[in-house]
């Protein structure tokens, strides 16, 4: 190893698993030693992290681990995150110094990982964002793909409602629904006029602003004949109001519930609609579709190439000092970002 | 017509469709004229009414009629109810004076109905309650049958949770699950020790008291390996807690939600379980299974005859003066009654 190779790394540690809102003492910055590389391992310098609402779930202080779908991030652990790193040193036959790779990593500046922990190369593709592997070509794209084609089983005759439509998953889902499957009508829900305009520019027939005081009226006006399918990433008030516009025997794919990840209870004034109109709500986690990665990747690549899915404007890249990584992640919950929120380390 | 045939009838009218709890001015007693019988019609003297939580939904003052599954009961209407009446006069070729019939009627002492509005004869069967047509052999039995065999698709390998287990539908569902289908484990939820003991006497392996302060702990202890299927008639807190004990990829049939029919919002602190464990919640109204009435009736009759389903203790019959019909109905929401609540007119 050359002298320029670091022996330690700054690490964001989960100091106090949050119950409710994330607090000032939830995370702690520590300096951790880096182990010597063993055969099959590489040393990464992290370039960027993808930000997921689900990370809040993984670190929750009030969740029975048996009921979670992944290993929880526990007190004292480095915080788990999707990321892209550049290989500084390689003791792997598969990977070379200088290659960029993506995977489920942690909030560290430098990281020793086994080649088995690398999901794939994160090559820079001309004309595309260098972080696309954290978005459309990452788990978010796969989620939108499986949500549209498998969970919701979208057909051209469907009227479709999508919440979080300006988010990383929702914005891809909207495009698949409208431009690939050709759904009769696609209505998005997003926060604010600017985001709604962007969602419409992606192909949505309409987009309703949940921050507006007339949200319920607006949503009902946008869907006079109701929605056959509702792809929900929001939970909360949006879900409650949406229950009044899902058609009889309609289907709700509960892909996310950003509104309640911080521990807030879900208050539904319209839950009786589930009974009256025999709605189905089905929880959806992408890990049930990991066997379809090859199919999804093929489809998404083709659709991007054919211009059916655009990633223009679908990324919010925030230059971030390492110690501010949690701050950038928390922007997810402010509703201020559009498309994929990328933490670019500077 | 003989002089003894009434020309008018006392009628319970929906004076003010309720929003929230039923109030003193929700109903009004009126004297209505009875029309002369036309061909095909009969005059009934009502003997009893069945009481359904769903009646609260039909008369709600805050429900968009397009979103309801039946015609709403509107301001000024006689209140719709299942009932059994005796034929006083018949101008129908199908029905004779003295026969007892059942159907969807209204809260009147006397009633003129067309033969098409009669569901069937409500004959008194030796050894059985004369009101069984309002319970096991009525829509409640059909609901339990379709819930168990069609919606929940119960199998012997299933562990099953049933709320409202001491109610008219739940108590039949428990027996079908355990004694007909032979489910591995059947756990009921009911209010109070006495009701829980009764549910266990019906065959449930366990029954948990939702009124107990240790309800959550008790339910989790009763289902250490979770429930594959949850048949929910309660909604509210019971549903919220139950979300923590439904197994990964488990199924919740939302047959009722007594707790919210009076307009109370549903507060769920555990909704994230729907996502984490990819639960399915499906609303269920028996009208989707009306094509199966013959099959259900055949099955239920056979199971009763074979002793697999008992109706002993499964009825709370309340002698009621006509003007007190709404009072007896409201006992449903107090949780004080067991099995089918029957209003017997005296």
Image (spheres, coloured by chain):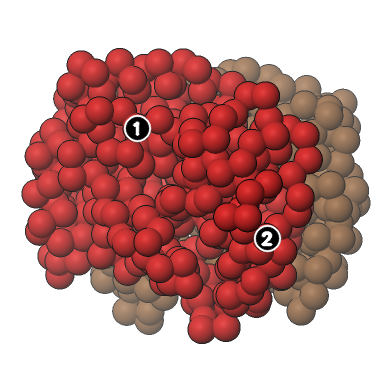
Chain colours: A red, B brown
Query: Tag 1, which chain?
Result: A
Relative to A4, A299 lies left or right = left
Q: Position of residue A124 (x, y in %)?
A: 34, 32
Rate crowding at label 1 as few (under 14), some (14 to 19) or many (20 or more) other CA atoms within 10 Å. some
Same chain shared by disc 1 and disc 2: yes
Q: Earlier in the sequence, mark 1 or mark 2?
A: 2
The answer to whether residue A321 is seen in the rendering is yes
Q: Which residue is mark 2?
A: A7
Q: Quadrant of residue A117?
A: top right
**Secondary structure state at the residue bearing disc 1:** loop
Rate crowding at label 2 as few (under 14), some (14 to 19) or many (20 or more) other CA atoms within 10 Å. few
**Secondary structure state at the residue bearing disc 2:** loop
Q: Residue at x 53, y 50 (%)?
A: A45
Q: Residue A14 — which label?
A: none
Relative to B54, B77 lies left or right = left
Q: Residue at x 83, y 27 (%)?
A: B156
């Amino acid at each position: 190893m050359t002298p320029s190779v670091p022996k330690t790394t700054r690490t964001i540690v989960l100091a106090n698993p949050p119950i409710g809102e994330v607090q000032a003492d939830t995370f702690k910055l520590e300096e951790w030693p880096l182990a010597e590389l063993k055969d099959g391992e590489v040393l990464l310098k992290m370039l960027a992290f993808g930000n997921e609402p689900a990370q809040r779930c993984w670190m929750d202080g009030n969740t029975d681990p048996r009921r979670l779908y992944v290993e929880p991030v526990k007190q004292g652990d480095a915080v788990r995150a999707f990321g892209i790193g550049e290989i500084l040193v390689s003791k792997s036959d598969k990977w070379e110094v200088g290659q960029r790779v993506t995977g489920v990593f942690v909030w560290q500046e430098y990281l020793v990982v086994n080649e088995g922990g690398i999901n794939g190369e994160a090559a820079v593709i001309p004309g595309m964002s260098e972080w696309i592997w954290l978005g459309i070509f990452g788990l978010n794209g796969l989620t939108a793909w499986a949500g549209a084609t498998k969970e919701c089983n979208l057909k051209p005759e469907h009227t479709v409602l999508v919440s979080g439509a300006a988010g990383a998953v929702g914005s891809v889902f909207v495009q698949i629904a409208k431009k690939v499957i050709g759904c009769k009508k696609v209505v998005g829900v997003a926060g604010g006029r600017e985001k709604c305009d962007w969602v419409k520019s992606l192909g949505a027939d309409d987009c309703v602003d949940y921050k507006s005081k007339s949200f319920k009226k607006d949503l009902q006006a946008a869907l006079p004949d109701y929605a056959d399918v509702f792809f929900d990433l929001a939970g909360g008030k949006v879900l409650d109001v949406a229950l009044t516009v899902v058609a009889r025997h309609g289907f709700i794919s509960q892909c996310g519930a950003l509104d309640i990840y911080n521990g807030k209870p879900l208050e539904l004034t319209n839950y009786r609609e589930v009974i009256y109109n025999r709605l189905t709500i089905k929880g959806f986690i992408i890990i049930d579709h990991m066997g379809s990665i090859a199919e999804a990747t093929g489809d998404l690549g083709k659709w991007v190439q054919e211009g059916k899915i655009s990633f223009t404007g679908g990324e919010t890249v925030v230059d971030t000092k390492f110690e501010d990584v949690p701050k950038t992640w928390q922007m997810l919950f402010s509703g201020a970002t559009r498309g994929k929120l990328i933490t670019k380390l500077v």
